[in-house]
Amino acid sequence: MFDTIMAALGEAFHLIISGNHEVYSIVWRSLGVSGLATLLACLWGIPIAIALGLYSFPGKKLLMSLSNAFLGIPTVALGLLLFLLWSQSGPLGFMSLLYTPIGIAIGQSILITPILVSFTSSALNSTDVEMSDLAKTLGASTFQTNFAIIREALWAILLAVTASFSRAFAELGVAMMVGGNIRNVTRVLTTFIALETAKGEIAFSLALGIILMAIILSITLLLNYCRRE
Amino acid sequence: MAKPQNQRLIVSTTTSLYETGLLDVLETEFEKKHSSIDVAFLSQGTGLAIQTAMRGDADMILVHDPARELKFLQDGYGVNRKVIAYNFFVIVGPKEDPVGINGLSPVQALTKIKGAGKNGSVEWVSRGDDSGTHTKEKRLWTAGGFSVSDLREKSWYLEAGQGMTATLKLTDEKLAYTLCDLGSYLNNYKKGNIQLEVLVEEGEDTLNVYSAIANNPKHFDLSGTSFNASIRFLDFLISEETQEILADFGNEEFDSPLFNPYIPLLASGSNPEMLQWIQELAYFDGTECPQECRYQEGDLYR
Amino acid sequence: MSLKLQLNNVSKRYGNTKAIDSISFDAEGNNIIALLGVNGSGKTTLLRTIAGLERADEGSLSINNEELGLPELRKIATLVFQRTVMFSRSVYDNLAFGLRIRGLEKEKIAGEVSKALEAVGLRDLDRRKAKKTSGGEQQRIALARAFLLNPKILLLDEPTANLDVSSAKIVEEIIKNRRTKDCVIILATHNLHQAKRLADEIFHIHEGRILERATPAEFFTNPRNENTKRFINGELQF
Ligand SMILES: Nc1ncnc2c1ncn2[C@@H]1O[C@H](COP(=O)(O)OP(=O)(O)OP(=O)(O)O)[C@@H](O)[C@H]1O
Ligand SMILES: [Mg+2]
């Protein structure tokens, strides 16, 4: 057990410094796909979170419960659903999203939207009352007040975005079902790990896992570092 | 990423075949010859692989389950089936072989294992995932006169529900027995993942035959180009060069080939017994592909 | 004509608690009003209502005989909170916030901010993160942040509670200098001496009502209300 882990660490290190072409291209693809997924999720997730965190409207409670309920949606189930939708014989087959990186990105963006919405709206919520009173008494309009609160919660929101990205980056079900793990096309880190594990390449798989963790860790550390600056 | 003007040929195949690495080699070779076609392999369990093709999400299948292949053809989903290669399943178990199945026939071995299982002295691990290997295993039990649905109730009959590597690891940990394709076994054994030994070797009952089938363009309303690409790939698979690659694959790494090419066997007539086994298992009424299930087959069946 | 603030039967309930109970008064510019009263008597609620942060359940507020809603009130009234709140930004940004909202130019803002910081003796702190200053410093920042907006109604909720003696003195001086005919200053305090030193008028708030309204001299020497007398002697409880 210990031997395997040490071997994997060595292997991971070796893969990184030797610039293994296959691994690098897969890592870049994963970053691209999950980055796009995060961007898409922000596009609709942040406005929803702002609405939930700063405004009250009918159906807000329902929307919040819904978003909380979908926090733990099984990735394979979502992947399967999208697979059926986007299949040539499914209702959205004409979109040609199955087995494409864009398809994975869209699937992952759906997967992480609840996380993004939940984390962001609660970040906004928790800064709300006193800060908004302060902004208001200093003369801010409702819009300006909300802007100030969003700014105040910026780091917490960035943290939510990072957490969402990590979830997308580390998920397997959607990438596997929607992407199909096609070499050079839709193979991402997690599907690569699944394949190599199935092939019995235990140390290599573990090394890939270490690389995955290292990337997520670096992004989080970078964010924390920037925050301190 | 694929250049957009390239034709994408999606081949849905089984995990045990894909995981040997053979298909990546074939992909490279094929694309060297046909630079305008991008071959993409979807590696799934046999059940899902066939379903994917039935949904129209793949252009052809490369699997090892003759009965389901026939259904795929007869239901109009596929055309132009070609038998490509064969190898053998093996029954593997602990080196000490507590049940003593070494050298027995598969059915005899299973009978002994069942007896020992009843006494609680040994366990059997089934893939339990509806894969081609799983189908084969169920067929072996049935051949021995046992009902699989009864076996599933027994505490010594474990269903892994996972791929071959995971199933082998489970078998290894439990000092149990399982059915496995030779490729997966050698691969994991050479990597030191398992200590299991091959106890029951090749025989008619453990024959494993791989075939390729193109999606039926009439059924799927396929663009002619995608069907064309499937035919090219079929041609490529049965070509002399490819069959040689098949014969050599694994030699270097495992000191033993993982696959036996079928075309030379058919052509040379050097091993009539083997040929007969294969045709009994994987031919339908004496043909690898019924006449009505062929379409623009060209030279495929010459 | 100096500024005139009028409250007309203003009430505010929180659930079953009547935090303020039909309060009416007039106040003119050039005046400092001190609110005295035991904990929970309604001082903060009154200030927040005047600041336009709480919507009165009943009654009306007007400035110069014109009834105002919450947004208008917020534009002309500024409250310094009992519990200081800082944006998680630099001290400079905290002070500049209100000026930026009012659309002032950059140079103008810089000038105003440094003047205001100078006035509370925190000139060197402008680049510091506001949340990384001491409690007393934060209170002074909060005061400077309100002062530089020159509000017509300046509301101070226990402005010197966290300050040392000399800082409190400085702040009291600033408050006194703010007394102009265009500005009504209302402060809530627990410091009777401070009320005596600063106020032109003292309101004794009790259970959400104004029990006594008098000049400091009268208030401390000759209170009319029995409860006010007990309050001054520290015998009144909520
Ligand atoms: N947000 C609120 N929700 C419910 N009750 C409140 C709220 N704010 C104040 N109250 C209640 O209203 C009453 C008046 O409170 P207020 O804060 O105005 O008192 P105060 O005079 O400022 O007291 P202190 O001297 O302790 O600051 C109290 O009974 C208080 O508990
Ligand atoms: Mg108070």
Image (spheres, grey):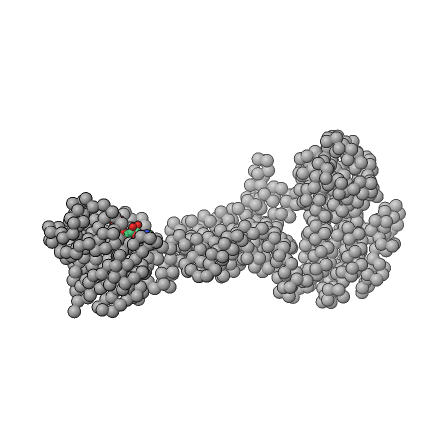
> Is residue C12 placed above or below B206 in the rendered structure?
below
Tell me what residue is drawn at x 56 percent, y 52 percent: A73
Q: Quadrant of residue A120?
A: bottom left
Residue B18, percent across and down? 70, 50
**Left or right: A59 as drawn, with respect to C101:** right
- Looking at the image, which is closer to me, C197 or A94? C197
Q: Quadrant of the N terminus of chain C?
A: bottom left
Q: Residue at x 68, y 54 (%)?
A: B42
Rendering quarter of residue B231: bottom right
Instruction: Identify the residue shown where x is 24% and y is 63%.
Output: C8
How many numbered circles are shown?
0
The answer, for residue A164, to whether it is visible in the render is no
Image coords of residue C48 (percent x, y): 28, 57
Q: Is residue C45 left or right of residue B208?
A: left
- Between C192 and B195, which is closer to the camera in this rendering? C192
Q: Is residue A9 visible?
A: yes
- Residue A128 image offset from top left, x and y in percent: 38, 55
Question: Left or right: where does residue B18 sit relative to residue A45?
Answer: right
Looking at the image, which is closer to me, A150 or C133?
A150
Residue at 60%, 44% (x, y): give it.
A205
Residue B3 location (% of width, % of height): 63, 63
